[in-house]
Image: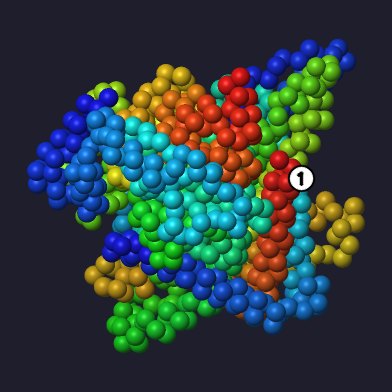
Amino acid sequence: METPNNERGNERETNQDDPGYERAIHQEWHHALDHTADLKAAGDPTDPTVVTAPADTTAAAQASPTDLPIAPTEPAVAPAAGTATAVVAGHPKHVADPSDLVLAIRGLRVSFSGNEILHGVDIDAPRGGVVALVGPSGCGKTTLLRSVNRLTELAPTASITGEVQLDGSNIYDRGTDLNLLRRRIGMVFQQPNPFPMTIFDNVAFAMREQAKSRPSRSSLMPAVEDVLQRAGLWGEVKDNLDRNALSLSGGQQQRLCIARTLAAHPEVILMDEPCSALDPRSTARIEELIVQLAGSLTIVIVTHNLAQAKRIGDYAAYLLNGDLIEQGLAEQVFEDPREQSTRDFVSGMFG
Amino acid sequence: MPTRLSDRGGVAAAYAAGGVLVIAITVIMAWLVWQGLSTISWDFLTTGPAPGSLEQGVAGGILPALVGTMIVIAFGMLVAIPLGLGVAIFLTEYRQPNWLAKGTDTAIDLIFGVPSVVFALFGLAIFSQGWLSWLSNPVGDAGMATAQSFFCASLMMALIGLPPVVRSSQAAILGVPNQQREASYALGKGRLTTIRRIVVPGARPGIATGIVLGIGRIAGDTAIVWILLGGAVLQAPPDGWYLPWNLVDFLRSEGSTLTTYIFFSSPAGEGNSPGQAYGAAFVLMVVILFVNIALIRLSRRKIGKR
Amino acid sequence: MASFTRPLQTPTPQAAPSGARADTVFRGLVIATAGFMLLVILAITAFVLYTGWPSFSANGLAWFGSGDQPLDVQLGNSFLGVPETGEPSTALNAWPAIVGTLLTTGGALLLSFPFALLGAIFIAELAPKRLAAILDPIVTILAATPSVIYGLFAILVLAPRIERNFIPQQQAEDLSAVVTLTGANVLLGILVLTLMIAPLMIAIFADALRAVPNKWKEGAIALGCDEWRMTRRVSLRAIRPALVAGTTLAMGRAVGEAIALSMATGSIGFIPNPLDGYFFFLEPVRTMASSIVDYSEGFESPELKANLFAFGVILLIMTATLTIGAKLASRSAERRLGGDQ
Ligand SMILES: Nc1ncnc2c1ncn2[C@@H]1O[C@H](COP(=O)(O)OP(=O)(O)OP(=O)(O)O)[C@@H](O)[C@H]1O
Ligand SMILES: [Mg+2]
């Protein structure tokens, strides 16, 4: 599982040497490269040896003692910005430092036409982890996810309060560059939604958006191949990149959408039930893909499939009627939930 | 704000286009309302052109033109509605034989695209034949007909009003759920009963939309009226034209509508009197406005039903 | 196309004995109305072609040529008779009328397509919701406004202003031997057609833009596009069939418009001379469709009738080609969009 990641790292460096490639790609690509380099310097997060390092475990324990109560869902007690503490404990394998929160949602309230859907939710996403959001239908998972890349406000009736901190700064602050934000926080939708263009154009979409001048096809090709490789689609489509993306199967389309998102070099990817429209085989492919991507990326995934949440999630958060009931390490939430309602939900779903 | 220069240019251009649109709309509306209101009066609507006013310019009112517009709408739609519904039902409920379905489909598209001046020529070619002189009036003894009458104009207007009736009804009939048809068949009802009791009532808002669209097209057409109703003269209807025993004769006679009245009294026509043209244009726009208000209401109703 | 075809076969009903005959009769009626439509389109073609044929057969390919007599003189000759003999003649070199139609239609399309596209983007994506809600029905009304009203606006409001501001006395006098310049000219013809077809195109394009599936719009926004980039990169691709359909519909309207152009173009069968610089646009023309209306009082003359019907034949061919071409083009555009995967 780690091998392809390492290969990818090498490949990127080779790409960097290519002058045409250099010219074509906008700064953000370099940001991403630098970011990867930083991560590497800090210790490859996908390296299992680092994960089991005792020093890290202690740090995690200090940051969030195991017996820390679940984040209160009362709005009055919502922690102020900047004072966020990781409410999650333990140390899953993808996460270098559980206290290093790439995403911290604080007291998020969303209402549509005065009807409050989220009543002040706090959620933590440690860097490199996979956070699985679960909860019954209609509890606000999609709304929560769409509030993290500020899609919720596209609905004119929506009003949003609270904070979403990305690397410590609130994305709801005035002056946030929405387009930049949405490149840093990618999204994969429930229904695969490739654009009505060729496979190549779909993948190159974000790169062309980010490029200053129109990049040539050959200069984009290495990057296109790279993300298609990472999305596990390259082998199936490499011979007909000019095929209409809509002619792919549902599972292929969803992997294409993941590739398209990866090409924008996001730090976080939000996934809203990415497998709900897919058959079990395609689902397995995508789960595999998520696990591979974790570590270099942070993933927040909504799923109705608790088995899936357990398989791929490092952390889990349980949402009920717009309130966060419980969050923590996935194993703990699913096997030994603290709250009775979580227990009911989990046993209902598994039982 | 987009960062790229070309994007900024594009957005600026789109805003500029929007601005031009707003200005153009304001200017045209203001012009029409201003000029129209200064001409229009109760007399203007309820009297005919002043006698002897046709040579030096038109004076007096527009009643005959208004009546003419109503007549071509009424008679045109009287033909277009049953025909259009029949075609729509064929294209949705039957579609057999297949070649006929395909052919009819294309025919409706073609009829929708044919310019009205070509319909006028077609009407002229057909209705000027002697054996159809009962639709207008015979010419001399050459076995020809004038081809200029309310009948002739209305029949060609029917072709203008037909395509929207067909297309809207077709879409609406397709929207009637199949279960409803099956339920009716399951009760042992025949096809005709099912169509009459289930399909057509279910498609009513869509059919109405098509009819209103057709009315709008007919009300706005000039070329057909000019050529097939005789636009050059503006006649006042004879007294008692609406009495049943006079009606057929009246419908065989020439006349005018609001559109030809405007054309005739504009500087491009012989009756060069802009004031009258403004007044008639204002009245015609009011008709079109009503048509559009009806359309908006119908579309609301359709959405409400789903 | 596909949307109008019921995918499921309507189940064959177990006809109740009482209704069976009525059903058969009704089926026959419905088939007859459909057949009648075929008949109508065939009859239009046959009658117009038959009546106009003498004009084509008398002139051969020269019909499309430019000849050396002005259009108005030629049409006058086929009504009043040739000066030498006094006999009406079918002789016609229709190039000036063809030029008139092509110039006004082409000019109006060049002007209104970009304007309509930008205007539609403004209304559908950029404008504040309130403004869009006001503009939307007004654009629909403008699209439904009778062409004669635009003609009136052109000749009463625009023409005097063009005449005052763009036609210097001196220049007009220099050209007066060739043609009289007034406010009614090619430019005004183009403007009046633009007034007619731009709202139509805006309405069609804006509807299509709004109908672009939300998943594509949100997909683009989630990748960091703003509304403009989203529209440019995704929506415009998705609405290609509507772009084709709307443009050809507008083109058909422009080609066949008789009344408004008769009012606005000056209705003089002149061929604007490109050597006159920008005066090219200030010279009058007469289109095929407006010739028919302008000379409609002369239908008693079989020669003029044949010539005017010949214009009708060309208009019929042009609009039929547009209709069928648009259908094929938007169908293939839809296929490329994966409409039938
Ligand atoms: N744009 C909107 N306008 C009004 N109400 C909305 C809007 N979007 C969502 N809602 C409401 O918010 C509530 C939560 O919806 P949401 O889609 O977030 O639930 P969910 O947890 O994702 O459900 P599911 O598991 O079925 O996807 C629902 O009651 C829904 O009706
Ligand atoms: Mg959801």
Read off the chain for label 1. B
Residue under the image location 49 percent in, 60 percent down: A80
Disc 1: which residue: B78
Q: Position of residue C106 (x, y in %)?
A: 38, 57
Q: Quadrant of the C terminus of chain B?
A: top right
From what the image shows, is residue C105 above or below residue C151? above
Which element type, helix, strand or loop, lies under badge 1? helix
Residue at horizontal 64 percent and vertical 37 percent from the top: B171
Nearer to the camera, A88 or C239:
A88
- Vertical position of residue A10 compared to residue B16: above or below: above
**Image-based side of B102 in relation to A313, left or right:** right
Whether disc 1's CB lies below 8 Å from ligand 1 is answered no
Answer left or right for B117 relative to B143. left
Pick whichever, A91 or C173, lies toward us.
A91
Residue B202 shows up from this direction:
yes
Q: Quadrant of ligand 1?
A: top right
Locate residue C47: give its quadrant.
top right
Query: For the point 54% across and 29% down, which residue is it?
Result: A336
Residue C176 in the image: x percent, y percent? 34, 80
Amino acid tagged 1: Leu
Residue B255 point in image, percent of width and height: 72, 61
Asked whether B255 or C122 is in front, the reply is: C122
Please tell me whether residue A10 is drawn above or below residue A85 in the rendered image.
above
Residue B92 located left or right of residue B121? right
Q: Which corner quadrant of the image does residue A75 belong to?
A: bottom right
Residue B143 x/y as whole percent = 67, 45
Residue C36 visible, this orientation? no
